[in-house]
Structure formats: structure tokens, C-alpha cells
Amino acid sequence: MLGYATLGAKDLDKACAFYSALLGEIGGSQLMDAGRIRFFGTGMDAPMLAICTPYDEKAQVPGNGNMVAIPGDRATVDKLYAKAIELGATDDGEPGERMPVFYGAYVRDLDGNKLCFYEMKLG
């Protein structure tokens, strides 16, 4: 259902270095560079994350209520959270149980965009 989600960056090269290192932990890499926007993922036929400078050329600001959630098992949640913090992200909620079926961790990337790493087990 999801093709890609886009996050704005103040410094595209710095943001892409962050996401290359972070998403490399789960087999992701930069798949396409279209100048002001770069796509990361595991394949062009799978959901991707795009990092860009805003099209309107105005300042990048993180959206209130916007968040990109990246799934994985608990070990992956912990690994991605630790890697993000190592890369300069800020903590927005350490890994832990949020409800009986949801284990998650939250960070803000270098530009203040919110990311969630999670494991959800239903039934």
C-alpha cells in the first residue's frame, strides 16, 4: 500500500549520510538520486524512504504529528535506536513496551523528523 514516504532535510548530503548508515543496518541503501530527492530502500518494488530538500525551496521544518515507522523484531528495534542515537539523532522514547502488542522506540533525526522503530504482534 505504501510506495514511499518523504522527509525534508536542511543539508541533503548530511541527512543522506545519516540514512545510509541507519538503513544499512537492515539491508537498505540509496536506490536513486534525482538531485533534490534521494530514495532509500531494499528495492524499487518495495516501500522506500525519500530524503529531499523541499520543492518550494522554503526552509525545511518537521511536521507536527508526522512520523515514519520502520518495522522489525525487538532486536532490530534496539539496534536501529542505538544506531540512530550514535549517528546524532535525539531520543524521543527509548525502546520498550507501549502496549501488550507493541514494542517501539522513537528518535528525531538530524532535522527533527520523527522516526519510530517497532515490532507489532497481533493475536
Image (spheres, helix red, strand yellow):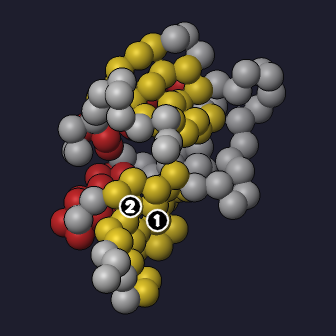
Label annotation for residue 106? 1
Q: Where does label 2 land, which residue?
A: 117
From the viewer's side, name the closer residue of 111 and 106. Answer: 106
Q: Is residue 103 visible?
A: no
Q: Residues within 10 Å of mark 1 (few under 14, many from 20)?
A: many
Distance, label 2 to label 1, CA atoms, is 6 Å
Badge 1 element: strand
* 9 sits to left or right of 41: right
Which quadrant of the rendered structure holds the C terminus? bottom left
> For mark 2, does the 10 Å Cα neighbourhood hold few (<14), some (14 to 19), or many (20 or more) residues?
many
Q: Amino acid at mark 1?
A: Tyr
Q: Is residue 108 above or below residue 46?
A: below
Q: Residue furthest bottom?
A: 100
**Which quarter of the picture shows residue 27?**
top left
- Under circle 2, the secondary element is strand
Q: Point out the residue furthest to the top here.
A: 35
Q: x and y percent of residue 42 in the render?
A: 28, 33
31 over 8 or under it: above or below: above
Toward the viewer: 114 or 71? 71
Task: Residue type at mark 2: give it.
Answer: Phe
- Quarter occupied by residue 47: top left
Residue found at x 50% / y 35%: 4
